Amino acid sequence: MAVDLRSDTVTRPTAAMRAAMMAAPLGDDVFGDDPTVNALQAQVAERLGFEDALLMPTGTQSNLVALMGHCQRGDEYLVGQMAHCYRWEGGGAAVLGSIQPQPLAHQPDGTLALADIAAAIKPDDPHFARTRLLALENTLGGKVMPLAYLQEATALARQHGLACHLDGARLFNAAVAQGGDPFEAARAICASFDSVSVCFSKGLGAPMGSVLCGSRDLIARARRWRKVAGGGLRQAGLLAAAMQHALDHHVHRLAEDHALARRLADGLQGLPGLVVEPPQTNIVFADVAPERAAGLIEHLKAHGVLATGLYRLRFVTHLDVDATGIDRAIDAVRSYFKA
Ligand SMILES: *Cc1c(COP(=O)(O)O)cnc(C)c1O
């Protein structure tokens, strides 16, 4: 079996997760009567400190309906250039929501400069789209956004009447990296936001599913848009049971993924032609000297290691890799650079 480090989305449901899915009481969630879905939504809302929550098939649809819940046609959201809900979702907010993005450059730590946020907020004038929302992401490219920054950026947005959305696809990676009780840390992050989207299909190891959290009003609007977007699922308790299992059993263990990412980064440090960024969570980025880049991904694949190299070489640790696999990946990379 290959060591698959392309993404933390590649995990297969564990035997215990499959058993939980098989045992789940089910109903029709479009009628609102799937007890497993309702219990999961209530629990996620409560644990993250929101009034309500909504099961979503994907993180992309979750961000989309959140943006559409906050913004009307002709409104605008401020967002980082590398943010998923701007760059990696096919322009969905603009294409499907008639919402204009205003992308901003990131600082080296992934944050958006407060001065850039302030400068991008448009005056109320018919020349401009109405700036309605600030959308942040945590973790962003595996980086943890400092809590003080999240508080300051969202406070600034609020002073200008904007709402605030967090793409927390990897919220629990950020929470675990901060130390202490991960649910308390997650709640502290979420406290600055009107809505938060969390992926269960990544490090948490569920086969699919995200949850969008927000006020009762926002979630009611999101529920309409989810149906419009074709995301109303029927016996979705099958999925919610997997997600519930992930919430109960796979949050604290994210620390193991972070430790393996550090092990990988340490093992790759110092190779000529490779600059490794020390990981904060479960994603290791490395920049390859351009003259060494061609053939690297194929070499790794031939040695049973899968990685991506769209922008930079990227390895992601997860539930289905262990130290042996990481050491194999280190050996595969080293054999390439030594050749
Ligand atoms: C993966 C991801 C999403 C989208 O999730 P899908 O379930 O793949 O649609 C959104 N935001 C971030 C930051 C992600 O990493």
Image (cartoon, helix red, strand yellow):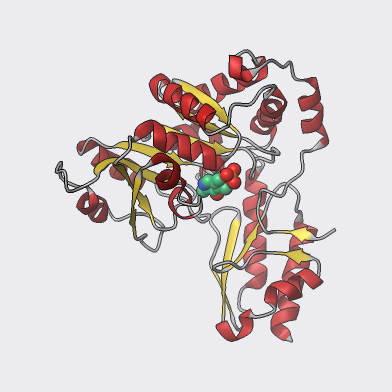
Which residue shows up at 62% across the image and 52% down it? 258
User: Can residue 194 be spotted in the picture?
Assistant: no
Question: Quick one: quadrant of the C terminus?
Answer: bottom right
- Relative vertical location of residue 173 with respect to residue 105 in this rendering, above or below: above
Which residue shows up at 62% across the image and 19% down it? 29
Which residue shows up at 36% across the image and 33% down it? 70
How far from the left and from the top, in percent, is residue 213? 47, 29
Q: Is residue 221 left or right of residue 270?
A: left
Which residue shows up at 71% across the image and 30% down it? 242
Tally of marks: 0
Q: Nearer the viewer, residue 140 or 189?
A: 140
- Relative vertical location of residue 277 with respect to residue 173 in this rendering, above or below: below
Q: Residue 276 is drawn in which quadrant?
A: bottom right
Q: Is residue 180 left or right of residue 327?
A: left
Q: Is residue 172 left or right of residue 317?
A: left
How far from the left and from the top, in percent, is residue 327? 76, 65
How far from the left and from the top, in percent, is residue 293? 62, 79
Q: Residue 148 is drawn in which quadrant?
A: top left
How far from the left and from the top, in percent, is residue 55? 57, 28
Residue extending farthest right = 1
Q: Nearer the viewer, residue 182 or 117?
A: 117
Question: Quick one: quadrant of the N terminus?
Answer: bottom right
Q: Is residue 105 left or right of residue 235?
A: left
User: Can residue 7 be spotted in the picture?
Assistant: yes
